[in-house]
Image (cartoon, rainbow, N blue to C red):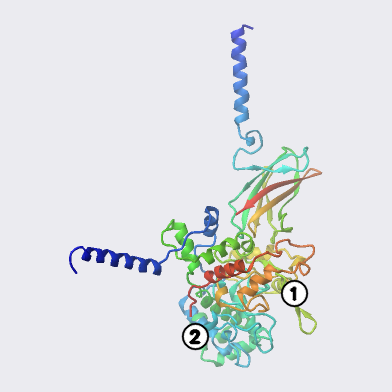
Amino acid sequence: MHAHARAQRGAFLWGLITAICMLPSTAFACVSDDAFLPLTAERPSAPEAFVLIDPITAVKPFAMTVRFCDEGAAISDVTVDATMPAHRHGMNYQPDITNIGEQAFKAENLVFHMPGHWQLAVSARFDTELYNYTLDITVK
Amino acid sequence: MTGLWRPIWAILVTLSAGQVWASHTAFAELLLTPAQIDQAQSFGPWPPPRLKDPSNHVSGVPEAIAFGQALFSSPVLSVNGTQACISCHRPEEAFAEPLATSQGFAPLDRNSQSVVNAAFNRWFGWDGSTDNLWAQSLHPIIDNAEMGHTPRSLKESLLKSDLRARYEAVFGDPAQDDPERLLVNVGKALSAYQETLVSGRSSFDQFRDQLADGDLTALTYPAAAQRGFQLFVGKGRCHFCHMGPHFTNGEFQDAGIPYLLPGNRVDSGRFGGLKALFDSPYTLAGPYSDDPDRSGAWATKAVRPNHADFGAFRVPSLRLAAKTAPFMHDGSLATLTDVVTHYNEIDMERMHTDGIAILEPLGLNQQEIDDLVAFLMSIGDGDIPQ
């Protein structure tokens, strides 16, 4: 290839790679809304999972939407819970979990009754395999 | 006075007057950091908007409020006509009990809390055995140790009393109501009245609002109270439970106060309260709620019993702490200084060993204790309705 054309192709490729790196992490996941936060999986083999959390005010109930990314898997036994690791206690209320379709689940009536660091814990069974996820949340 | 002396004298007088004025209106220096100013905002505004209770169809109804006020001081609500709500919730004591524990037909085990601001609670009573104010109002009426009625005896007493006409004006002919319905209606009228009992703005609220407005030029909030606030949200960690405009998260905590009672009994607190809640027909999920959506019932349906509930009691609001001594569920701490000292020296051996690592000795010196008390007093110096 002509040197000039090679240089042009190289510049194009670098530009393309840069553009891809600048895209939000959700751009290649099953969620397109940047407001969704990625959950941290316990195991590297776990399907990706994201959560969209309503604004949290301590003591008041709030809701969140959890979306899993494993097209074709039957998802069941979804649980959503949270603890305050420093205080060694959890929530005082059991969230309601509803399957809203497209591998998404709505969790309602979560209550963080103290300010500080909470750890969200989500688990789900994909066909027969159970995976666990966490997310750290600070409530002011 | 001649020559230069007149203007010199005028200057001296002006300077002297300025000094006197300054000494009488010595504005406080702001001690809070920007982060603490931000935190102060979370404890207001006060008062919050008052919303009608959808589970009570007479919430906000003037005739029901007036009837409820009459009921609140009426001995008709006790089976022998000797006790009224005001016997324990004394208006002259901020609607609270100045004794350690209250006296019904029998000595009671707990201190009667103030009913001022009660309308803003999620749970009621020290043990959260009720989830709404009308249920909390009717329970003492039918408690054997408190006012001793049954629904039937209450109906009989009301029909014979001068309150019959007032009941009829709000709810219709009481003779046509079954006793349970009449009991609930009495509770709802009492609740409608108590919803109007809201404490006024305190000196802390004024300070908080000044900070919100950025008005830092004329602060009068004392330095001791400011230092106390800094301890409240800092070293004292009080705000973990005593948060928001009500200075409570409304949940339950074992605060290291003994729950053993005379006669080999125990006060199980929230543990027993939840049992009573689940057995009660008077909850927001139950048949007597007027809310077709049962919108408040989620908490009763979703609450998780936990073995750590044993000996845990509802975190009280600190809004009235300046006026409602003594303190804790058994009234065992006489002053706010005693309360702060209790938390400062809390016995870790007494706390749940597997449990919640929130409370631990604070390490406050005497000045810090005094400052924290000064802050607590400033939260609750607003007017109490009569």
> What residue is shown with label 1?
B268
Q: Amino acid at mark 2?
A: Arg
Vertical order, B11 against A119 (above or below): below
Give the left or right position of residue B162, taking residue B335 as reference: left
Give the left or right position of residue B41, taking residue A53 as reference: left
Residue drawn 36% across the image and 69% down it: B20
Residue drawn 65% across the image and 55% down it: A116
Dot 1 lies on which element?
A: loop
* Image x and y of residue A78, in percent: 74, 49
Which part of the image, by quadrant, shows the N terminus of chain A?
Answer: top right
* Image x and y of residue B372, in percent: 59, 67
Vertical order, B84 against B292 (above or below): below
> What residue is shown with label 2?
B166
- Chain of the residue where label 2 is placed in the rendered structure: B
- Image quarter for residue B79? bottom right
* Image x and y of residue A38, in percent: 67, 41
Looking at the image, can residue B139 be seen? yes
Residue placed furthest toward the left: B2
Q: Which residue is more in the foreground, B364 or B286?
A: B364
- Chain of the residue where label 1 is placed in the rendered structure: B
Contact between labelled residues 1 and 2, with CB atoms less than 8 Å apart: no
Q: Which residue is more in the foreground, B374 or B178?
A: B374
* Image x and y of residue B59, in percent: 51, 73
Disc on the earlier residue, 2 or 1 = 2
Q: Which residue is more in the foreground, B346 or B88?
A: B346
Vertical order, B107 against A140 (above or below): below
- Image quarter for residue B321? bottom right
Which part of the image, by quadrant, shows the C terminus of chain A?
Answer: bottom right
- Image quarter for residue B88? bottom right
Q: Amino acid at mark 1?
A: Ser
